[in-house]
Amino acid sequence: MNQTKKEIKDFLISKDIKFSSIFEIDKLPGGSSNETWIIKYKNDSIEEKIVLRRHFQGMRNIDNKYPPLSLKIESDVMKAAYDEKIPVPKILYRTESKSNLGEGFFMEFIDGVALGNKIVDNNFLKSKKVNLSEQCGYYLSKIHKIDHERLENIQKSEAIDEFKKYFEIYRNYNLSIPVFDFSFKWLEKNIPNNEKLHLLHGDFRNGNILMSEKTGIKSILDWELLHLGDPHEDLAWICVNSWRFGKINKPVGGFGEREDFYNSYEKASDFKINKKSIQFWEVLGTLKWGIMCLKMYDAYKSGYDKSVDRAAIGRRSSETEIDLLRLITKEFLDE
Amino acid sequence: MNNPPSKEELIISIINFLENDIISELKGQKRFHAHVAKNSLNIVLRQLKLEEENNSNEKKRLKEILKIEGNLKDLNQILCEKINNEEIDINNDKLIDHLYKTTMEKLSIDQPNYSGYLAEKE
């Protein structure tokens, strides 16, 4: 057993003697700023699992300007969400930055499907009573209603901040992609008025929501981009075509209709959704994904990650170009 | 001039090798990477076929909009600058037409199965 696995086991045993039965510890592949570990143990001869999430060790500071969110804050917010009966994994133990394991937390393991292309399959849901768009609208409104005043150190990022952030990243790549410049110019001219600040998930999309084919949403994952901002940002992100997994005619995550999603959100909150703001955030969200593709390619170019998919993903940025043009010049015209 | 096979034939032989002999042998991340490798070769194959005509169309339109000569890279850079400093209005029909055409040409190489590309083609 290597050193980290030993440290994980020692830490857990110090919390609860049942963890002496740990028989397998694996690190999941992937993850850019955080590591995820799955720990298996036996409880009365029944196999159980818990999950460790901690900062990437031996942190390479390639992106000092936008460091990953502290896992202390991430777990504070997840705990607040759990207390509001939002489906998220329960936080079990935290580890301090000065400890052997570094900053992180252990959480319960929840079973379900998170693979976007499986969820958009017409045969995924086994019950006609379940409406995933309505569930998304309902739980998103509950996230936005979390009282963020009592949570500490959460960054604010409104429309103008997000616009500037991504414009700067694009500029630094020194590329000339006319559709991107065209879209940034359109965004600059259509920046919405500031809304009252709400707590946003920041990455609420198909792929980050664990689903069950019988009951729908089981758990909302990947909170590392959470911040305070305009609720339209979250409402638009899940509708960006890149997250529809090929099902372009199902605007909500490739599985549902806008009406169901918006109506259920508005019904559960006092918030009135503004279509112009949705358009702004859908354009910015699409552009964001296009720039993230270039950013991932940059990891290849810089020699940091020489894998075949980091090289290829740069070419996926052109997918967002057609979506951007359609969003700006066609899709929202008759609304 | 080189003896056969052509560069296209060489690439196709690797695509077939990956598809028929390699991918089924692999699991997990390596299998995924082998898929990506196959897709990348398909992009190169399409680019060999379409790039010349696409680029010449793009250049022709850029020269018309910008009224200057230059290579494709410089012309695109100038277009970006003019969009940025608003010398060209983003509501300009010629600009929008050019952006659509160029994007569709790019996608015909990068991702001709992409849902947004197929929807626009209809």
Image (cartoon, coloured by chain):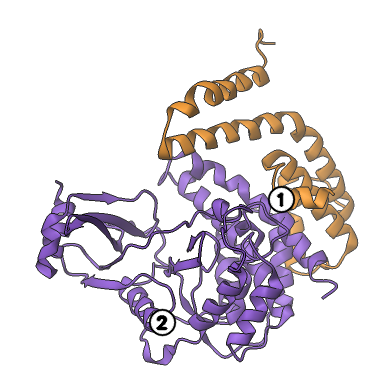
Q: Which amino acid does label 2 sit on?
A: Ile
Chain in purple (letter): A
In the figure, A209 relative to A143: above or below? above
**Can residue A232 be seen?**
yes
Q: What residue type is labelled 1?
A: Ser
Q: For mark 2, does the 10 Å Cα neighbourhood hold few (<14), some (14 to 19), or many (20 or more) residues?
A: some
| Numbered badge on residue B115 | 1
| Numbered badge on residue B58 | none
- Nearest to the observer: residue A201 or residue A66: A201
- A51 vs A183, left or right, is left
Return the residue found at the far top. B3
Q: Distance between the residues labelled 2 and 1?
A: 37 Å
Residue shown at 13%/54% (left/top)?
Answer: A6
Depth check, mark 2 against mark 1: the one in front is 1
Chain in orange (letter): B
- Residue B26: give x, y in percent of width and height: 43, 30
- Nearest to the observer: residue A320 or residue A170: A320
